[in-house]
Image (spheres, helix red, strand yellow):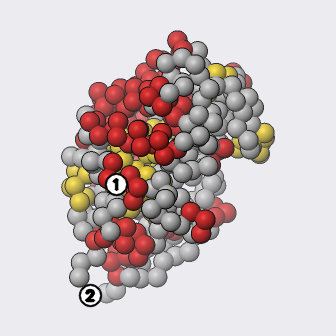
Amino acid sequence: MTFKLLTPVTLGRYELPNRLVMAPLTRNRASAGNVPTELNATYYAQRASAGLIVTEASQISPQGMGYPATPGIYSPEQVEGWKLVTQAVHDRGGRIFLQLWHVGRISHPSLQPNGELPVAPSAIAPAGMAATYTGEQPFVTPRALELSEIPGIVEDYRQAAENALAAGFDGIEVHGANGYLIDQFLQDGSNHRTDAYGGSIENRARFLLEVLEAVIGVWGSDRVGLRLSPTGTFNDMHDSDPKALFSYVVQALNPLNLAYLHLVEPRWDNPEVRDKTKDLGAHFFRPLYRGTLISAGGFTRETGNAVLEAGDADLIAYGRWFISNPDLPERFALNADLNPYDRNTFYGGDSRGYTDYPALERQPA
Ligand code: 8OZ
């Protein structure tokens, strides 16, 4: 019997050798100026056997930053740094999409240009703490974006998409998940606007759809993906009717013919959200979405394959297992043991816990 995870699949304009996606993973190892380095290139190249790599979230502008040492895609130096990454991945035969990110209110004045307030759809502080260069600090109340500022942020996405093209990526993924700016517009817990970008579901989805239109203008729809997290509560997200909101959004994507829609599932190891017929995950959205679906969220080799066999998704994204197993597709093919991951080195640091996880020893022929 063929093991579906390891079968080829078409994604947009690409033919992928397997259905494992390396999930976008914030690792906080960019150099000064938020510039990717040779170390980052080595890390991604080690993982080039993934059907597709999605990079860590990368801010589209200085204002879009919310954590220490995350890479950007707005300066010439960053574009040069990313070229090291894309070249190294392509030399190993891989494909890599850049994830475009604006954090909105999930930031702190100490991370913002001129110490300004972070911006958001509405002046509502998220509960919780910001990760800054001097440790955790309470989130501040963000400044609500003026209506007149929104086209400029859409333009930042478009310019970032152009920069990604110049840096040699194979495509881009718009980060619409996990409580960052786009998600802040979508959900009414963070969007209290009364203009064309707030109120009705149609209005709250407007910013997302404008961003997608702008970046599709650069890349074509078959090289643009989108990530959403309809059930996520990370970064203090909540909505009064997530089922109605995300059903609308997912159906509004159909005419765009994106390369894929990438859904963050509720964690399957959480018994409270285990009923997949009720969860707003891939199983729920599959009948509503006509294109390629990637499902992410705590999968193993077996549970991921089962989702594919059930027809609920086309590809599975693995995060933590790709951190600790650079050769994850080969390990799945052999049903080999996996290296355990060390959470202490997930965010920040050096090559330790980053490029030093071993691949399987090759047996001599
Ligand atoms: C963990 C730590 C920092 C950022 C996300 C970009 O949740 C992130 C992120 C995750 O999408």
Image quarter (top left, top right, bottom left or bottom right) of the N terminus: bottom left
Residue at x-position 34% and y-position 54%:
286
Position of the C terminus by quadrant: bottom left
Of residue 194 and residue 184, the one placed in the foreground of this image is: 194
- Mark toward the viewer: 2 or 1: 1
How far separated are the C-alphas under marks 2 and 1? 44 Å
Q: Which of 173 and 264 is in front in this view?
A: 264
Q: Residue at x 61, y 49 (%)?
A: 233
Looking at the image, tell me whether mark 2 or mark 1 is earlier in sequence order.
1
Q: Which of 130 and 182 is in front in this view?
A: 182
Q: In this view, does 195 lie above or below 131?
A: above
Tell me the SS state at disc 1: helix
Residue located beneath label 2 in the image: 365
Amino acid type indicated by mark 1: Arg
Is 249 placed above or below 230 here?
Answer: above
Residue 161 position within the rendered picture, expressed as x and y whole percent measured from the top left: 38, 32
- Could you say where residue 27 lies in the image, as x and y percent from the top left? 57, 52
Q: Name the residue under label 1.
A: 286
The part of the image, by quadrant, that contains residue 306 is: bottom left
Q: Decide if ligand 1 comes within 8 Å of the CB at mark 2.
A: no
